[in-house]
Image (cartoon, rainbow, N blue to C red):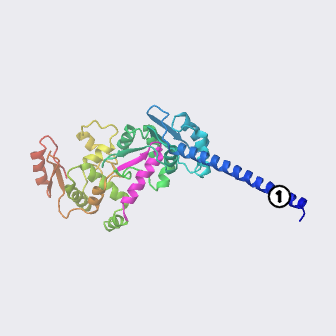
Amino acid sequence: MDEGERNRQLKVLESLLSGRRGLLVGGAFLLVAALIVLGYMAAFLLTPYHGHSSVAEIEIRRGDTFAAVARELGEKGVVSHPRLFAFWARLRGLDTRVHRGLYRFEGAVSPRSVLDGLVRGRTVVYKVTIPEGFTVRQIGRVLESKGLAMPEKFAAAVADPSLLASLGADSVEGYLFPTTYLFRALATEEEIVKTMFAEFKDRFTPALQARARELGLTRHELVTLASIIEKEGGPTVEMPLVSAVFHNRLKRGMRLQSDPTVIYGLEDFNGNLTRKDLRSPGPYNTYTIRGLPPGPIANPGLVALKAALHPAEVDYLYFVSRNDGSHHFSESLREHNAAVRKYQKNRRAETP
């Protein structure tokens, strides 16, 4: 190999080495840049940010884009860089998986925690307890006091024919199960009604349905009877006895003569049930009609439902309050009237 050829090859080798050094330098620069970006991103995602005074709330509505959500989070001081937050969510494919509702952020919170909450649907919820024996109207007032329902909208929802049809019911009275619920802050009145109705269906098990059939009662009749038992009050242990009185009366064709049914049928009850009220005919006046009224007079709990299905094996036909929360039960009218005179001096005596 002559000197010229050797020099040419040396130049080619030097050129290759120079190019490799350039690539190495460029790669190192890109690696450093990537590490810087990743570090900045990690710091952004993991560092709690507190750009608001104390509490920030945002509402995500149906149809809102994630970009709009991120922008509002920035405006409310929840995240420091809305665009970077939106980019990260889109990069992870989570920008389309957020849940609508009302979200509340208290104190400093990291963007990672914010997105996790949006994806998991950690919306503001309200805890509300519906007592046994409340009517639909009373339930509406409870929901209103918690800021969960507007009176007129709730009244419209419980009477909405399309909603009732979807539930397979003519009325929701008796079927809004009394228990403790956690409702989303932005739950609609229709959603609340559906949730409470679904709770009733879950509690009214096949075993309870089978027992109702054994007694020759439809579900509606059973719930109606349970609602009367619930409204008559008294200790839980007395419910099967109250149930027995009504079952015995129904078997004998006697009127139920239950004050709560009369009260339910009155438009504006002032707290004073009069003889005129008892004598005024009406579908819920069990002093004038025989059998059960046309529907429930309240929303019974599970204890009342079970009492209606399992009456005590006694021959009682009457009961009267002892004024201490309990009742005196009697088999005969004579014994009952004596109990009325003893415990309720100003109360009318029962008539057959």
Which residue is most to the top?
Answer: 53
Mark 1 neighbour density, 10 Å: few (under 14) some (14–19) many (20 or more): few
Looking at this view, is 60 or 143 the one in front?
Answer: 60
Return the residue nearer the eye: 263 or 113: 113
In the rendered image, the vertical position of residue 281 relative to residue 237, given as above or below: above
Q: At which x and y percent is residue 114?
A: 50, 44
- Residue at 43% across, 40% down: 149
Image location of residue 58, percent across then percent down: 51, 38
Q: Locate residue 242 relative to residue 16 in the image: left or right.
A: left
The quadrant in which residue 53 appears is top left
Q: Position of residue 104 (x, y in %)?
A: 46, 40
Instruction: Give the residues drawn in magenta, as a range.
Output: 180-205
Q: Is residue 121 left or right of residue 325?
A: right
Rendered position, 352 above or below 348: below
SS assignment at label 1: helix
Is residue 287 found left or right of 295 in the rendered image? left
- Is 38 part of what is drawn in magenta? no
Q: In front here: 284 or 235?
A: 235
Residue 159 visible from this viewpoint: no
> Residue drawn at (36%, 59%), measured in percent from left and top?
203
Q: Residue at x 36, y 41 (%)?
A: 142
Residue 67 seen: yes
Q: Is residue 305 above or below residue 152?
A: below
Q: Residue 116 or 284: which is nearer the viewer?
A: 116
| Residue 200 on the magenta span | yes
Q: Amino acid at mark 1?
A: Leu
Q: Position of residue 146 (x, y in %)?
A: 38, 39
- Residue 74: which quarter of the image? top right
On-image quarter of the N terminus: bottom right
Residue position marked by numbered label 1 in the rendering: 10
